[in-house]
Image: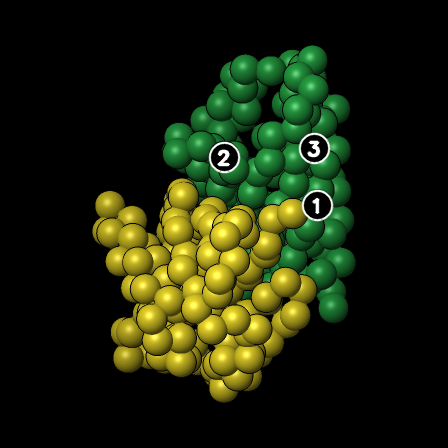
Chain colours: A green, B yellow
Amino acid sequence: MEFESIAKQFVDHYYNTFDTNRGALAGLYRENSMMTFQSDKKLGAATIAQKLAELPFQKVKHEIRSFESQPTPNDGIIILVAGALLVDEEQNPLNYAQTFQLVKDPTGAWFLFNDIFTLLV
Amino acid sequence: MEFESIAKQFVDHYYNTFDTNRGALAGLYRENSMMTFQSDKKLGAATIAQKLAELPFQKVKHEIRSFESQPTPNDGIIILVAGALLVDEEQNPLNYAQTFQLVKDPTGAWFLFNDIFTLLV
């Protein structure tokens, strides 16, 4: 299914970019995008980019353990990822869940309308 | 925010119903609803209800550990839940993540368009 292949490409791209060039994630958001990061809610690409830049670690490596996707009513794609991340010199991975909704902007480019990240404790 | 209060009510209702009267969950889905349960994909309320009925446990208790919500482009609500469930006589809880998208049907009633459930290993 096409949405599954788009979801897979997006997830690979998102975490590779997060781990190697975090600042470039800003291009995946628009003015009406929302990000909830551990209960901290941000609106708009600039605000989200600032939050991502301020995260208190330098090195980070995400490991995807599972992901699933479905189409949404707005011709978008909803994605649920479960994974683990290693930050800086920490030896123990932190488990997380993250959900995204990808939608198309007026030019036909995919962007993140919704992004919710939660560490699992 | 109104969407947060709707999300909270929905999450409480969904898991209470799941734990006490699983068959009644069918009313939360419509013909175009999708459920992905551990990679098994179902379409439509009847198919989803059958899948829920066939889950291989009798007693189940969900414990919600965190949930977050955001509005979506279609005047819907996206929700990410992290929790644990205890099934039958099992002593060890199973951790899970679940994402939902609630949208309104033509009568104005909320239903689940998207539902993705993943056990965390």
* Position of residue B22 measured from the top left corner of the image (x, y, whole percent): 40, 75
Q: Nearer the viewer, mark 1 or mark 2?
A: 2
- The amino acid on which the numbered mark 1 sits, given as a three-letter code, is Arg
Residue A59 is situated, as x and y percent measured from the top left of the image, at 69, 17
Q: Which mark is residue A65?
A: 1
Query: Which of the 4 image quarters holds residue B61?
Result: bottom left
On the question of residue B103 being in view, the answer is no
- In whole angstroms, how far apart are the C-alphas of marks 1 and 3? 9 Å
Chain bearing tag 2 is A
Q: Nearer the viewer, residue A36 or B106?
A: A36
Q: Chain letter of disc 3?
A: A
Q: Is residue B115 left or right of residue B3?
A: right
Horizontal side of B81 relative to A57 (left or right) equals left
Type of the residue with mark 2: Val
Q: Residue at x 37, y 67 (%)?
A: B19
Q: Quadrant of the N terminus of chain A?
A: bottom right
**Residue at horizontal 74 percent and vertical 33 percent from the top:** A16
Residue B81 visible here = yes
Q: Residue at x 55, y 79 (%)?
A: B54
**Mark 2 highlights which residue?**
A121
A74 to A58, vertically: above or below? below
Does residue A49 sit above or below B97 in this rendering?
Answer: above
Nearer to me, A101 or A58: A58
Distance of label 3 from label 2 (alpha carbons): 17 Å
SS at badge 2: loop
Dot 2, how many residues are within 10 Å of its Cα: few (below 14), some (14-19), or many (20+)? few
Which residue type carries mark 3?
His
Q: Which residue is mark 3?
A: A62
